[in-house]
């Protein structure tokens, strides 16, 4: 404390102001980051919802995607000079997938006189998926309108992850269409150049079929099944196996049953379920068959992503694929290729798509480039052939 004497209006005042607080003993940013749309590479000015179980942290949102948590680090983390603090949070934004994030607030030398906030850098936001569908038609002389073309294959000739600059020829930066659609979506984050995807059938094990005794909600890792016959840690269970748009394949990490194997048991799963399954749902035991060639991820993926970008499509066909190689456990997804054949009325529909700025649609006689409108789930794109 430093005192001083001031004189004003014939009066003399002795002032002894408090010393300014040390760097860590004040309200300030503890974790900071910027949210960036991975397609536009800008921070969208939207409504953000941040949640954390870390005590004493308050969310703060600025413009252009800059945000973080604020608090008083000296009061919240008095041992930060020697002990790091793990902070986890979720970031939700309309039109984007939920981001689940974590960071370690590293020990700070000289704390509390010194403080350095944790910087999570740029958090890439992944768009919710959309669907491309439309009609392939031909303009015929003498016809009043375009003529639908049945039996025409429609596929991708290329994609753009981001919009190219105005001074760059888009054809020179077009990416090869090495992407597949996944159902229900990634169970864990996947890393570029580390994780891989390969075709792998899962064979139904006869005589070990089960049902769910209780409903299984989205996000749960425990399910109660009718019996534990043939189920052990590592066993893969298929939930709703007869419905390709709802089936989930998840490995068991532990099983707790009753006195005999034919009574209901509780299985703990390697991942949180992404689809809700009703009581009485069929559950099959399945076993992996011989795998096809592996293809490395060409872009990082996050939980719930329904598109995998790969360095190739060797051995990949529509069906079950195996994903693994990184720190996360192996998972299984139902994969679809971005190909379609028009029906008798000339209509096509492609699997759910996301994470691209533009795509080049290709038919044997025509092609066009379109940019998805992520504000609408169904994008109508007609292809006119000469």
Image (spheres, rainbow, N blue to C red):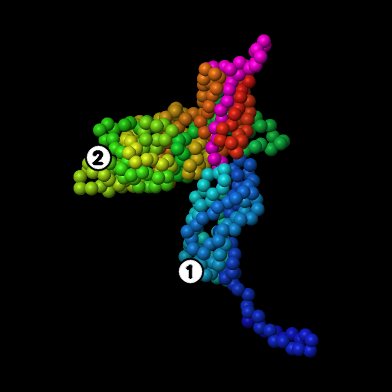
Residue at the spot x=48%, y=42% of the render?
A: 304
Nearest the viewer among 378 and 309 is 378
* 282 sits to left or right of 357: left
- The correct choice, above or below, for 103 with respect to 365 in the image is below
* Magenta segment: 124-152
Is 145 colored magenta in this rendering? yes
- The correct choice, above or below, for 259 with respect to 297 in the image is below
What number of labels is visible? 2
Q: Which mark is residue 229?
A: 2
Q: Quadrant of the N terminus?
A: bottom right
Residue at the spot x=76%, y=86% of the render?
A: 7
* 88 sits to left or right of 212: right
- The correct choice, above or below, for 22 with respect to 236 in the image is below
Look at discs 1 and 2 and give the one toward the viewer.
2
Nearest the viewer among 174 and 34 is 34
Q: Please say whether residue 128 is visible from this viewpoint.
A: yes
Q: Earlier in the sequence, mark 1 or mark 2?
A: 1
Nearest the viewer among 344 and 186 is 344
Residue at the spot x=35%, y=31% of the render?
A: 290
Q: CA distance from mark 1 to mark 2?
A: 50 Å
Nearest the viewer among 196 and 354 is 354
Question: SS of the residue at dot 2?
Answer: loop
Q: Are marks 1 and 2 in contact (CB under 8 Å)?
A: no
Q: Which mark is residue 88?
A: none
Q: Please say whether residue 365 is visible from this viewpoint.
A: no
Mark 2, Cα crowd under 10 Å, few <14 / some 14-19 / many 20+, is some
Q: Residue furthest top?
A: 142
Residue on which the image places disc 1: 79
Q: At which x and y percent is residue 216?
A: 37, 44
Question: SS of the residue at dot 1?
Answer: loop
């Amino acid at each position: 404390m430093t005192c001083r004497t001031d004189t004003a209006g014939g009066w003399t005042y002795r002032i002894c102001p408090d010393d300014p607080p040390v760097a860590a003993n004040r309200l300030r940013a503890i974790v900071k980051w910027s949210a960036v749309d991975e397609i536009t590479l800008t921070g969208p000015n939207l409504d953000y919802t941040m949640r954390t179980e870390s005590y004493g942290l308050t969310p703060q949102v600025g413009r252009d995607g800059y945000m973080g948590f604020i608090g008083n680090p000296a009061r919240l983390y008095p041992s930060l000079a020697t002990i790091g603090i793990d902070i986890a949070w979720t970031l939700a934004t309309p039109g984007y997938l939920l981001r689940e994030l974590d960071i370690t607030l590293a020990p700070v030398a000289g704390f509390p006189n010194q403080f350095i906030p944790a910087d999570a850098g740029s958090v890439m936001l992944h768009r919710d998926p959309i669907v491309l569908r439309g009609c392939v038609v031909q303009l015929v002389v003498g016809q009043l309108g375009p003529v639908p073309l049945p039996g025409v294959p429609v596929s991708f000739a290329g994609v753009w992850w981001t919009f190219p600059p105005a001074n760059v020829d888009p054809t020179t930066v077009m990416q090869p269409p090495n992407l597949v659609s996944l159902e229900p979506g990634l169970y864990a984050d996947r890393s570029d150049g580390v994780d891989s995807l390969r075709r792998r059938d899962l064979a139904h094990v006869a005589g070990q079929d089960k049902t769910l005794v209780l409903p299984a909600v989205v996000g749960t890792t425990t399910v109660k099944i009718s019996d534990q016959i043939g189920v052990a840690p590592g066993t893969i269970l298929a939930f709703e196996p007869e419905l390709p748009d709802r089936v989930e394949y998840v490995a068991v990490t532990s099983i707790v049953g009753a006195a005999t194997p034919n009574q209901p048991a509780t299985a703990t799963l390697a991942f949180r379920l992404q689809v809700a399954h009703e009581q009485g749902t069929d559950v099959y035991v399945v076993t992996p068959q011989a795998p096809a060639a592996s293809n490395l991820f060409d872009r990082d993926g996050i939980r719930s992503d329904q598109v995998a970008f790969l360095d190739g499509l060797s051995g990949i066909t529509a069906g079950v694929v195996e994903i693994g190689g990184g720190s996360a456990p192996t998972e299984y997804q139902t994969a679809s290729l971005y190909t379609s054949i028009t029906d008798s009325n000339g209509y096509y529909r492609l699997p759910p798509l996301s994470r691209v700025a533009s795509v080049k649609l290709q038919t044997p006689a025509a092609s066009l480039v379109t940019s998805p409108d992520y504000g609408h789930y169904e994008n109508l794109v007609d292809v006119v052939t000469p």
